[in-house]
Image: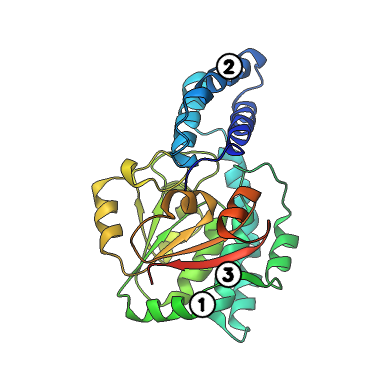
Amino acid sequence: MKTFLDCLPCMMDQALRAGRMATDDERIIKKLLDTVGAMMKDIPMENTPPETGEIIYRKVREITGVTDPYKEIKKANIEEALSLYPELKKNVEESDNSLLTAIRMAIAGNVIDLGVNKKFNLVEDVQKILKQDFAILDFDKFEKQLKIADSVLYLGDNAGESVFDKILIEELNKPVTYVVREIPVINDVTEEDAIASGINEVAEIISSGTTAPAVILSLCNNEFIERFNNSKLIISKGQGNYEGLSNVKQPVFFLLKAKCFVIANELNVEENDIVLKGINV
C-alpha cells in the first residue's frame, strides 16, 4: 500500500507522541520534530507508510537516546490483557463457533494500538467487537486454507494484543510460528513481550528482522523470508502489516480493525469496521 497525503500529518503526530513518551525535554522534542519535518518533503509517496515509520522511529531513538519509550505502557497492556484471558477463553469455549469467536478475539485485541491517536477502553472495546458484524468476512476461505496448511505463520502486531493472539493460536490446532519485531518500535510486540504474553507456551517465536512498525519484506531476515515464501497460511495482524503486505503473492489473511479512514478507504469499508480479508486464496 502506498503512502497517501493524509499519512504525512499522522507521521508528524506519531513523532511528537513518541518524543513525549521518551522525554519531557522540550528542546529534544523540538529537534526531533524539526528533523522529521525536514524529511517530509523527500518521502517517496510510492513507499509504504511503515517504511517511512522505520525512519521516523529510528530518529526517535537517535535523538532522544531512548530505545523503548513505550516499555512501561506495553507491560501494563500485557498485564491488563492477561487479567481478561480466563474470561475471554471461556467465551471462546462456550461459543457456537470457537474458531470464529477466537478470530473476533484476536481482532478485538487490535484496539491496543499506540501508533494511531485514538483512546481505547480494552474491556468495552472487546465486548463491542464480539457483537459487531464483519465488514469483510472471508471465514470460509480461512477454514479451507487452514485445512490444507501443515503449519501457520502468524505475524504479530502490538504488545497486549499478543495475549489475544494466544487465544486464536490455541484454536488453530496446527504448529504455529509467531513473528515479532526485531527491536522495540512503538508498542509493537518483541520477543520479550511475546514471552510475557505466554506465546512461547503455544508457538515458536521468531523475529522477522524488521526494525519497521510492520513486516517490510525488504528489511526482513533470510530465515523469515524463507518461511514466508513457503507458508500455505499466513495470518497478518493489524494495519501496519496490511500496509506492508497488501500486494504480496502469498496466501495471507489480514485480521484488523480499520482505525483510520485511509485504511478504511483502501479496504472499501467504514472506519472502525472489523475485517478478516484473505488474498491469494
Where is residue 93 drawn, in percent x and y? 59, 81
Q: Earlier in the sequence, mark 1 or mark 2?
A: 2
Q: Earlier in the sequence, mark 2 or mark 3?
A: 2
Q: CA distance from mark 1 to mark 2?
A: 46 Å
- Name the amino acid type tagged 3: Ile
Residue at point 52%, 57% (across, down)? 162
Neighbour class for label 2 at 10 Å: few (<14), some, many (≥20)?
A: few
- The residue tagged with tag 1: helix, strand or loop? helix
In front here: 131 or 192? 131
In front here: 279 or 215? 279
- Name the amino acid type tagged 2: Asp
Relative to 28, 57 lies left or right: left
Where is residue 151 drawn, in percent x and y? 32, 71
Q: Height in image: 138 above or below 214?
A: below
Indicate which disc residue 139 carries: 1
- The residue tagged with tag 2: helix, strand or loop? helix
Residue 39 visible within the image:
yes
- Name the amino acid type tagged 1: Phe
Q: Which residue is mark 2?
A: 34
In front here: 39 or 153? 39
Where is residue 89 drawn, in percent x and y? 59, 73
Neighbour class for label 1 at 10 Å: few (<14), some, many (≥20)?
A: some
Q: Which residue is mark 3?
A: 136
